[in-house]
Image: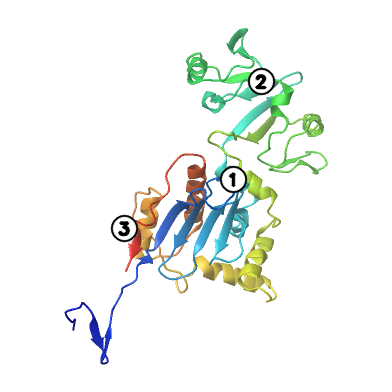
Amino acid sequence: LMTENGTFIINGTERVVVSQLHRSPGVFFDSDKGKTHSSGKVLYNARIIPYRGSWLDFEFDPKDNLFVRIDRRRKLPVTVILRALNYNTEEILDIFFEKNIFKIETNKIELTLVPERLRGETASFNIEKDGKIYVEKGRRITARHIQDLKNNKITSITVPIEYILGRIVSKNYMDKKTGETIIFANTEISLEILEKLKKSNFDIIETLFTNDLDHGPYISETLKIDSANDRASALIEIYRVMRPGEPPTKEATENLFENLFFSEDRYDLSSVGRMKFNRSLLRKEIEGSGTLNKKDIIDVIKKIINIRNGKGEVDDIDHLGNRRI
């Protein structure tokens, strides 16, 4: 029963009842608006909030590495959770990057051309084909140049050797005779390695397509600081964060990870949470399981990378549509 002052009488005492607003379940993308780091750099983050279960946070650091936190514990490189989901380095690179394909010939290197990828770059050599120069050395490549290359159906260009050096290969290259690895995925190509690849008769080399404009090398850089190199070591890393001081056995590490986000007894997004989750990731279906799956986690990572690349907006977390009583 409410009094005239808007208070309630509970067990004979006058009380004011305030209902609390909680973050509603779903996935939310946000940024620190440049307040965390002294340089004023905007750091983006994403948070998956279930109705019941562990929170999962993704966040960029000032060096543009991407990290994950489970239940606000110590952060781990995001690639640890990808390895725990049983992806290896090649598969991780395959999920998050487009590839540049170089054809190695005896006296020249040909790049399979996707004209859009040159946008915004400054040509470090004359871009020419059959004697015609499309972009002069030192010129910035504009939309007009790209249209020109497309109209003339230019599908490959010859590039100088410097153009491929320092690029990151997207997969492991093994010597076909000896079986030894010449270069591991996510490693830079040096002159020495290029010579070895030629000697082993590799005529096609795939590298990651990255640029400073809208395709940052974030996952590739994060892999470099990730000490876990397979699923077992990734599960141990997660176990040590969640259960410090307990010995990580194979069974214990697998059970813990399974129960965190993939067990219906321990984790539930709720139907509203799943609907908001799917809507945020622009999926057509609004229903789905209450637990997370591989695709959910990968899609959230892809979206936060897109936002960091300047494609997409963060959410308004103070909006009451993102809250529940």
Nearer to me, 200 or 255: 255
First in sequence: mark 3 vs mark 1 = 1
Nearer the observer: mark 2 or 3; the answer is: 3
* Mark 2 in CB contact with mark 1 (< 8 angstroms): no
Q: What element carries label 1?
A: loop
Q: Quadrant of residue 238?
A: bottom right
Question: Residue lying farthest top?
Answer: 131
Amino acid of disc 3 = Gly
Q: Where is residue 178 in the image (x, y as percent from the top left)?
A: 83, 42
Categorize mark 3 by other alpha carbons within 10 Å: few (<14), some (14-19), many (20+): few
| Residue hosting label 1 | 39
Nearer to me, 179 or 159: 159
Say which residue appears at 57% left-offset and 58% top-offset.
Answer: 68
Question: Residue lying farthest bottom?
Answer: 12
| Residue hosting label 2 | 124
Q: Position of residue 153 (x, y in %)?
A: 51, 16
First in sequence: mark 2 vs mark 3 = 2
Say which residue appears at 48% left-offset and 59% top-offset.
Answer: 293
Q: How far is the residue under mark 2 from the one under mark 1?
A: 31 Å
Picture layout, residue 290 above or below residue 319 = below
Q: Is mark 3 on a helix, strand or loop?
A: helix
Amino acid of disc 2 = Ser
Q: How far is the residue under mark 3 from the one under mark 1?
A: 33 Å
Quadrant of the snapshot with the N terminus: bottom left
Categorize mark 1 by other alpha carbons within 10 Å: few (<14), some (14-19), many (20+): few
